[in-house]
Amino acid sequence: MIKIMSTWKKFSEIDNSYQEKKILMAKELVNPDCLWVVTEKIDGENASINITNDGTITVGKNSLAIYSTDGNILNNGTLNIGENGVGIYSDGGNVNISNTSNINIGNNSAIGVYGINGQKIQNDSNNINIANGSYGFIVESGSNLTNNGATVLGDNGIFVYGNGAGTIINNTTGQITATGSDNIIFYTTNGGTIVN
């Protein structure tokens, strides 16, 4: 059960650049079952909602850091994701993981970025660490991923899982390192294209 700690439905911009702008105290950010940022389009409004994270967001077990529908997410900061948690869940819109980003993905089915419904994801970060039994990216229902960054997997990890994905591109700068055993770099089902 996810507890919604704070929601923004009427703001067009969310900027987590400064500590004092955080609505929640740091103690609350690390609690299990915490949903930190929620954005949803208001019915009848056409403007996209933009989220920028320049700070650090830490969520615990079974927790979700950022959720967005039809918005644009720019992550320049750090996401620490607990066991079975999700860093970014985005339905439509765009997600940009910049080259200053750090994403530390916990054990046991934790997910860095989960995109559905034509989501466009671009990763430029060289600091994505996937712990045992977890996922870097999940792309479903026509969502696309372009990877320009480096990633390290532990054991039993999957870098990209696609289910009905669009196109998954790993460019020449995309260095994927599997330090452990039983890892999968790309796993797709129900269509999708992989370009490596």
Image (tube, helix red, strand yellow):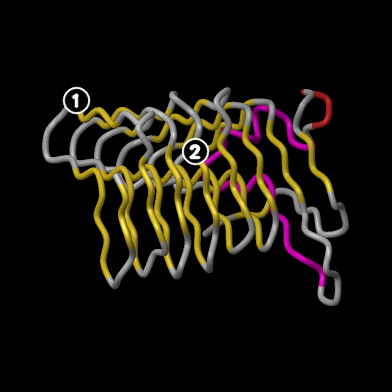
For disc 2, the marked residue is: 123
Q: In this view, does 105 lie to the left or right of 132?
A: right
Residue 58 locus on image (x, y percent): 56, 32
Question: Camera-side residue: 78 or 63?
Answer: 78
Give the residue drawn at x 32%, y 37%. 107
For disc 1, the marked residue is: 179
Give the residue drawn at x 68%, y 34%. 53
- Amino acid type at circle 2 is Asn
Residue 119 locus on image (x, y percent): 54, 59
Question: Camera-side residue: 55 or 151?
Answer: 151
Q: Is residue 101 above or below residue 49?
A: above
* Closer to viewer: mark 2 or mark 1: 2
Mark 1, other Cα within 10 Å: few <14 / some 14–19 / many ≥20? few
Q: In this view, does 114 lie above or below 196?
A: below
Mark nearer the N terminus (2 vs 1): 2
Residue 66 locus on image (x, y percent): 61, 47
Q: Is residue 20 left or right of residue 149?
A: right
> Residue 36 in magenta?
yes
| Circle 2: element type | strand
Mark 2, other Cα within 10 Å: few <14 / some 14–19 / many ≥20? many
Q: Give the range drawn in magenta.
A: 23-42
Q: How many marks?
A: 2
| Circle 1: element type | loop
User: Gap between marks 2 and 1, in whole Å?
Assistant: 20 Å
Question: Camera-side residue: 154 or 63?
Answer: 154
Give the residue drawn at x 38%, y 48%. 169
Query: Can residue 129 be seen in the rendering of this structure?
Result: no
Task: Spot the residue most to the bottom.
Answer: 44
Q: In this view, does 82 lie above or below 143?
A: above
Q: Residue 170 carries which label?
A: none
Locate the C terminus and report the quarter of the image it occupies: top left
Query: Can residue 21 be seen in the rendering of this structure?
Result: yes
